[in-house]
Amino acid sequence: MIVAVKRNKKQKIIRILSLAFVALMLVGYYFHMSSQMAEQDRIDMETKKAAKLKEEKIKETKKNFERAVLSEIEKAVDLVGQENVQHVKIIENKLVIICELKTNLDALMVRYGTLALIKNTLNEIIVAIDLKYIMERKKNV
C-alpha cells in the first residue's frame, strides 16, 4: 500500500512565518538585554565615580587635618624654642611636647591657656595639647 502525503503551501508558509517570528524574538531579546546591560554598566560607573569622589574627599580632609596639626606643632615648638624641645609626639588624640627642665613656657601658656596640660618631672617638662581643640580652632578661623 502506498500512502501519499500531500503538502500544502499553507504549511510551508506557516513554518516560514514561525521561524521568522522566532528569529525576530531572538533579535528583540538580544537588543533588550544589551540595553539593560548598558544601563547596568552606566549605573556601576556612576557608583564607582561617587565612591571615588567620596574617597578623594576623605583623603583631602585627612591632608587638611595633617597640615593643620603640623603647622600647630611648628608654632608650639617655635613658642617654646626649638633648642629646648627634646621630643614631639602624637599619642592618641594628644600632642605631647617634651621639653628641658628650665624651659620658659609663658608663650605657650598664653596661646593655649589651661588647655595645655603641663607636668614637671625631675628631668623634663611634659606639655600635652588636645588635637580636638586644635581642629576646632582651625574651623573657626
Image: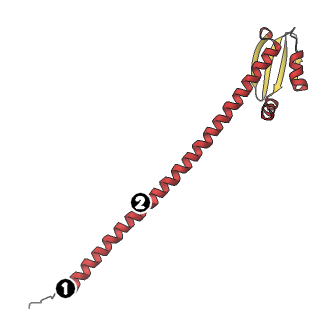
Q: Residue at x 73, y 27 (%)?
A: 68
Residue 127 x, y percent position in the rendering: 84, 19
Mark 2 / mark 1, whichever is N-terminal: 1
Q: Quadrant of residue 91?
A: top right
Q: Residue furthest bottom?
A: 1
Mark 1 lies on residue: 9
Q: Position of residue 64 (x, y in %)?
A: 69, 31
Above or below: residue 120 compared with residue 67: above
Q: Is residue 138 left or right of residue 62?
A: right
Residue 12 % position (x, y): 21, 81
Residue 121 appears left or right of 33? right
Compared to residue 40, the image places residue 131 above or below, namely: above
Q: Position of residue 33 (x, y in %)?
A: 42, 62
Determine which residue is flagged by label 2. 34
Three-letter residue code for mark 2 = Ser
- For the N terminus, the image quarter is bottom left
Give the amino acid at mark 1: Lys
